[in-house]
Image: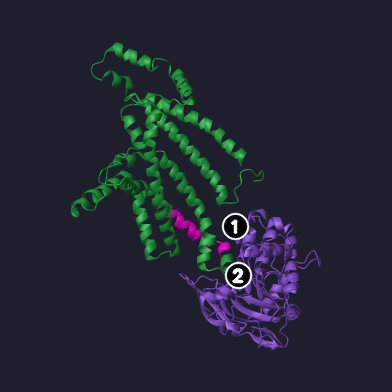
Chain colours: A purple, B green
Amino acid sequence: MAGDALLKVDDLKMYFHTRDGVVKAVDGVSYELERGGTLGIVGESGSGKSVHALTMMRLVPMPPGRIEGGDVLFKGRSLIAMSDEEIRHVRGNEIAMIFQDPMTSLNPVYRVGRQIAEPLMVHKGASRAEAWDRAVELLRLVGIPNPETRVRDYPHQFSGGMRQRAMIAMALACDPDIVIADEPTTALDVTIQAQIVELMLELQERTGSAIIMITHDLGVVADVADRVLVMYAGKAVEYGTVDEVYYRPLHPYTWGLLDSIPIHGVSEKSELCPIKGQPPSLIFLPSGCPFHPRCPHAQEICRTTVPTLRVIEGSHSSACHFSGDAGFTREGVACEVSPS
Amino acid sequence: MGQYILRRLLQFIPVFLGVTLVLFVLTRVIPGDPVKLLAGERSQDPVVYEAITKAYGLDKPILVQYVNYLGSIVKGDFGQSIATSREVTTIFKEKYPYTVKLALAAIFVEIIIGIGAGVISALRPYSFLDALVTLSTSVLVSLPVFWLGMLLQYFFGIWLKRWTGATLYLPISGAHSATFPDWVHLILPAVTLASVSTAYAARIMRSQLLEVQGQDYVRTAYAKGLSSRAVLWGHSMKNALIPVVTFVALDLGAMLSGAILTETVFNWPGIGYTIFSAIGKRDWPVVIGSTIIVTLVFMVINLVVDIGYAFLDPRIRYDESKA
């Protein structure tokens, strides 16, 4: 598996050099993505999930951003070392991206069709007419009714869900190997969210492209992903298959995440069990394990030594000093609900 | 769209009535009597004075005068100049082309230099060129137009002429001469008239382009694999230009209303200068008549700008019932 991974992210680090100090937005992320696979990346806001994706696509403005280390190999080629011209041919062609807010991600002054046709003209050398016809087909594929007429609409004539469908159509235009979806459902109504996720899975089955689904919605990840990467403060803290991470989570942060999901229909009195405290400042990271100030299991070693992501069993890895120790389990901790 | 235009044209009527009324009242309130001018300011014969007053209908109540005046305007008769007895429409036809020429030349300067400097500035923010543009626009905005005009006259017309021994210099007065082709006469007045607006256009262009370049849809365009040039010209420019075009177009309207200061400094025979000197002579028919026509031009241009929006920005459609 290791040899022919489609995408191999190796200890990627992206820091922002600001006036207030160095923001370690992505501080050592590693994973592999196979052809046709689906990776879910979860974490709180500010955990570096989006920035890591933009870093791979080289869409982070530099400066202030700077890649401080690590590499991203796509089909064996380094995306980090590529020239601007080379990465341009990867973007939208081999790796496409869907963004969080479909309301602002489409250009308001151009027709939807033109915006979907654009990557085809840039990457596949399609003529204007060919690309336009293909845009109609793509809109049909993503479930826009009357695509022949709607292709001539402007973005403001589309609803939020339709715009996200148009974004998906745009991402799929060149039949990419990887689609990176950066919180694609966050800005949408709950009813639309399920439709969009379903659509993405359906299309994945058809096109066979791999998906990186960045989200803070653990339910979405459980539905779509076969592998999960949990991020905290710019670092990968747990990585494994969906079953491993959801049923046998290893890292106390993942425990906290799973415990903070409201459980439907258990008991009226069951209260939410949030992770206490705030995510740390990415400029002044805590010493040792970045999660230790919020971790109910923190010991002396957590304050002094940064844990590395290590394999615990099979492909399931965790960045906690105690993962794998006998007796160090999620069930061992009771949820302490604060009275408020 | 047709309905919208019709509605806007109907709005012209109250504006037109308001403008004429204000002008009419103002010219009566301002001290100075055109009849005295005609009758001879020093030695006045009351009989002559009476006769002139009567001949121009100035003995009637002001409201009657106003209604009479409106009546003849509707027929296209703006009356005669008190000072020269020429038809106001004839004077206007003779002077207005100069104002149009000057306005178009100034707008040309504004578009090329203003938008150009703004784009250059925005492409490399905080660079040396950007600092230069920011500094020079600040200076230009704060310079009074007439003073800048006189500076340019002194530098290009007098100092340069002396320094080069009259081989290389620019004309500083009038619209025609034996030494220069007509377009050379336009250079200094056009630059002067355009100065402040060019600075504003550059600043608006810079800030708009910087803002648009940070928008999500620009990131989308990059993520599609477009080159930075394609993103700039294909995605950012049209969005960034919308406010700039508005500003330039409204500015054109203002310039077409006559650039009184510039035309006066450069002795330019346009409508602004004509109105200015007519005010000095209390030649009310010329003042009111020219102002009314200029107001109409301004209103028509505003209408054209509003209609033009719809072509630049598809979110604006005037006939759709939904907001």
Q: Does the magenta segment cover residue B212?
A: yes
Q: Can you give x and y, in whole percent of width and height, for residue B174 in the image? A: 29, 41
Q: Is residue A72 above or below residue A107?
A: below
Can residue A321 be spotted in the picture? no
Q: Magenta residues?
A: B202-218
Give whichever of A208, B213 is nearer the camera. A208
Can residue B184 be spotted in the picture? yes
* Chain letter, disc 1 residue: A
Q: Is residue B4 above or below residue B224?
A: above
Amino acid type of the residue that numbered disc 1 sits on in the rendered structure? Tyr
B276 to the left or right of B229 = left
B44 to the left or right of B62 = left
Q: Does the magenta segment cover residue A308?
A: no
Q: Can you give x and y, in whole percent of width and height, for residue A170 in the image? A: 65, 66
What residue is at 73 percent from the left and 60 percent from the top?
A144
The rendered magenta stretch, by its main secondary structure, is classed as helix
B251 to the left or right of A113 = left
Q: Which residue is mark 1?
A: A110
Amino acid type of the residue that numbered disc 2 sits on in the rendered structure? Gly
What residue is at 75 percent from the left and 74 percent from the top?
A205
Which type of secondary structure does the marked residue at label 2 adopt? loop
Give how far apart the Cα atoms at labels 2 and 1 are. 20 Å
What residue is at 66 percent from the left and 53 percent from the top?
A157
What residue is at 50 percent from the left and 41 percent from the top?
B302
Say which label, 2 or 1, has the lower sequence index: 1
Give whichever of B60, A21 is nearer the camera. B60
Q: Label 2 neighbourhood size at 10 Å, few (<14), some (14-19), many (20+)?
A: few
Which type of secondary structure does the marked residue at label 1 adopt? loop
Give whichever of A312, B237 is nearer the camera. B237
Residue A125: image tag = 2
